Image (cartoon, rainbow, N blue to C red):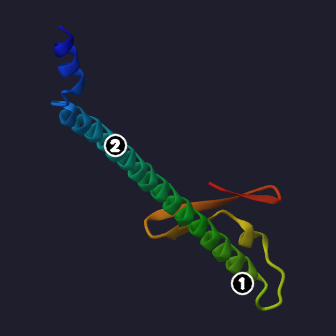
Amino acid sequence: MRSQLKKLRTDQRGIVLVMALMLMGLLAALASSYAIMVRSDTVLRGAAGQDRTAFYAAEAGLNKGMAEFGNLFSNYQLPTNSDFNIKTTSFNTRTGIVARIGRTARIC
């Protein structure tokens, strides 16, 4: 009986299989975490691109509106009431309406 226990303690057959399975599990965990990281980075880059596009579109709209408003005073005359009526503007396939409400303007 002692000889069988001693032989069992010193017998290392199968340990390579256990170590290989542990290594494969570790590599699978690393690969899945890397895939999740790449996916989240892709989503964040897409959101940042949309944010940047929206910012520059809004800035372009403001610049166009300021240029149109500046054109009212280009020949040093006061603007009339018809200059402040509802106007539409389009950019590519989008159309925006600027409505005058009292003394303030609202973009619809």
- Figure check: 71 above or below 55: below
What residue is shown at x 24% (from left), y 22% (from top)?
A: 9
Q: Secondary structure at mark 1?
A: helix
Q: Secondary structure at mark 2?
A: helix
CA distance separating discs 2 and 1: 59 Å
Amino acid type at mark 1: Asn
Left or right: 68 in relation to 8: right
- Figure check: 72 above or below 35: below
Q: Quadrant of the N terminus?
A: top left
- Figure check: 25 above or below 45: above
Label placed on residue 71? 1
Where is residue 56? Give x, y as percent: 58, 69
Is residue 31 shown to the viewer in this render?
Answer: yes
Left or right: 71 in relation to 20: right
Where is residue 4? Give x, y as percent: 16, 14
Where is residue 6? Give x, y as percent: 22, 19
Label 2 crowd (10 A; few <14 / some 14-19 / many >=20): few
- Mark 2, residue position: 32
User: Image quadrant of residue 41?
Assistant: bottom left
Is residue 88 shown to the viewer in this render?
Answer: no
What residue is shown at x 67% (from left), y 70% (from top)?
A: 62
Q: Quadrant of the C terminus?
A: bottom right
Which is more toward the observer, 76 or 49? Answer: 49
Where is residue 73? Give x, y as percent: 79, 84
